[in-house]
Amino acid sequence: MILNYTNVCNVRCHFCAFYRTGTESDAYTMTREQVLERISLFYDRYGIRQLLIQGGA
Ligand code: SF4
């Protein structure tokens, strides 16, 4: 499973279409509870064995 806990990033690489500055309507940062809920859901549903956590900087 790859978990992107936020798409807000201040690095702003020129090639990146993923990042948001934080003011856009689709900018998001998950809470700790949302992160745990998502991991639990994927574990229960898909039996995930690996977790890669990615996010902005
Ligand atoms: S999310 Fe990663 S690739 Fe995109 S601007 Fe931030 S550091 Fe660069």
Image (cartoon, helix red, strand yellow):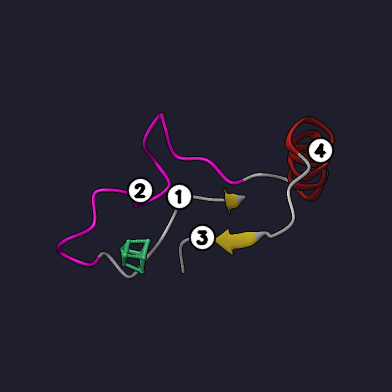
Q: Amino acid at mark 1?
A: Asn
Is mark 1 in CB contact (under 8 Å) with mark 2? yes
Q: Amino acid at mark 2?
A: Arg
- Helix, strand, or loop for circle 1? loop
Q: CA distance from mark 1 to mark 4?
A: 18 Å
Q: Which residues are magenta?
A: 13-29
Using the image as rendered, state which of residue 14 and residue 3 is in the foreground.
3
Using the image as rendered, state which of residue 16 and residue 46 is in the foreground.
46
Q: CA distance from mark 4 to mark 3?
A: 17 Å
Would the CB of label 3 be found within 8 Å of ligand 1? yes
Tell me the residue that label 2 is attached to.
20
- Helix, strand, or loop for circle 3? loop
What number is the disc on residue 37?
4
Is residue 4 in view from this perspective?
Answer: no
Q: Position of residue 57 (x, y in %)?
A: 46, 69
Tell me the residue that label 3 is attached to.
55
Q: Position of residue 15 (x, y in %)?
A: 16, 61
Is mark 4 in CB contact (under 8 Å) with mark 3? no
Tell me the residue that label 1 is attached to.
7
Other-residue count near label 3 (Cα within 10 Å), few / some / many at <14 / 14–19 / ≥20: some
Is residue 9 in view from this perspective?
Answer: yes
Residue 51 belongs to the span the image colors magenta: no
* Of pointers 1 and 2, the one earlier in the residue sequence: 1
Q: Residue at x 22, y 67 (%)?
A: 13
